[in-house]
Amino acid sequence: MKVLLFGSTGNLGQAIASELKNKGYETTCVVRDISKLKGLESITDKIINADVTNPTSLINICNGFDIVISALGKSVSPSDKSKLSFKDIDYIANSNILSEAKKSTVKKFIYISAFHSEKYLHLEYFKVHHEFSQKLILSGIDYTIIKPPAIFSAFKDMVEMAKKGQLINIGLGDKKTNPIYEGDLARITVDNIRGHNGIIEAGGKTIYTRRQLNEIVQQAINPDKSIRNVPLVFFKCLLPILKIFNKNTFDKFAFFIEVMQHDTIAPQLGEMTFEEYVKKVK
């Protein structure tokens, strides 16, 4: 069975590529930026260089493949300075891929979406995930949509902040969530290649408060430093200014502020704990 993987240079994409290799699938990875190939060559059979934001770059790209997996998505990291928006990547680029998949031999399309995207349609991050998911459902192609609350590697910025003594708690930090290790999510993704028209919500095995996640990182990385507390209202006041000067940054902080105010707990399908992950990457 031949698999075409998009978003393969990200942490989740590389984990999926590795899982596909371990399970014996013939895998081709699509890469937009060749400079990000490090580590990918050894875990895939073939690499295609194509710009997913340009439809002409994708013409016939899905021909000959049985499965398309898209882990493609714009990073929520504040350190990501790319000019493309959530809509450009998460909706338009994935729509370009789906358009080609519909014209080809592809039997199934697996998409990594976002947990509870349907509940926060006033936020760009969730809106574009939900809109593409709906487009995929109506496409006529067999699909699986996988919805994690977050993956562990999304917290790597916290590790760097902890090293510098800059880690902060936003608000009370009492809301709960269960992010999932990207290796566990990759396993769930590949295991569902043979599934049929489904939506899977997938979180980690352990539920944490936002404050606990910060404390785990700080204690593992730089225990001599303390975590500062910043009132949520400070960031809420900052949002209108960000919206004027930088829409991408506004969309990211609007996302952060929203999730800080709600419990986001998905079914506990992962195996690795956040403590184990932090020890592994510190």
Image: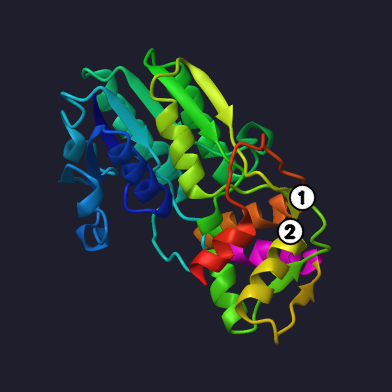
Closer to the camera in the image, 61 or 155? 155
Q: Residue at x 49, y 67 (%)?
A: 281
Q: What span is colored magenta in the figure?
A: 232-244
* 156 shown above or below 199: below
The picture places residue 4, in percent across and down from the top left corner, at 26, 34
* 31 shown above or below 267: below
Rendered-image quadrant of the N terminus: top left
Q: CA distance from mark 2 to mark 1?
A: 6 Å
| Quadrant in which residue 22 is drawn | top left
Is residue 200 visible in the rendered image? The answer is yes
Residue assigned mark 2: 210
| Quadrant in which residue 109 is drawn | top left
| Quadrant in which residue 242 is drawn | bottom right
From this viewpoint, which residue is outermost toward the bottom?
224
Is residue 7 visible in the rendered image? The answer is no
The picture places residue 76, in percent across and down from the top left corner, at 52, 56
Q: SS at mark 2?
A: helix
Q: Which mark is first along the chain, 1 or 2?
A: 1
* 234 shown above or below 209: below
Which dot marks residue 176?
1
Residue contact between numbered discs 2 and 1, judged by CB atoms under 8 Å:
yes
Q: Residue at x 64, y 69 (%)?
A: 217
Query: Does residue 73 appear to the left or right of 42 in the view shown?
Result: right
Q: Is residue 236 magenta?
A: yes
Query: Does residue 122 appear to the left or right of 261 in the view shown?
Result: left
The picture places residue 276, in percent across and down from the top left corner, at 59, 60
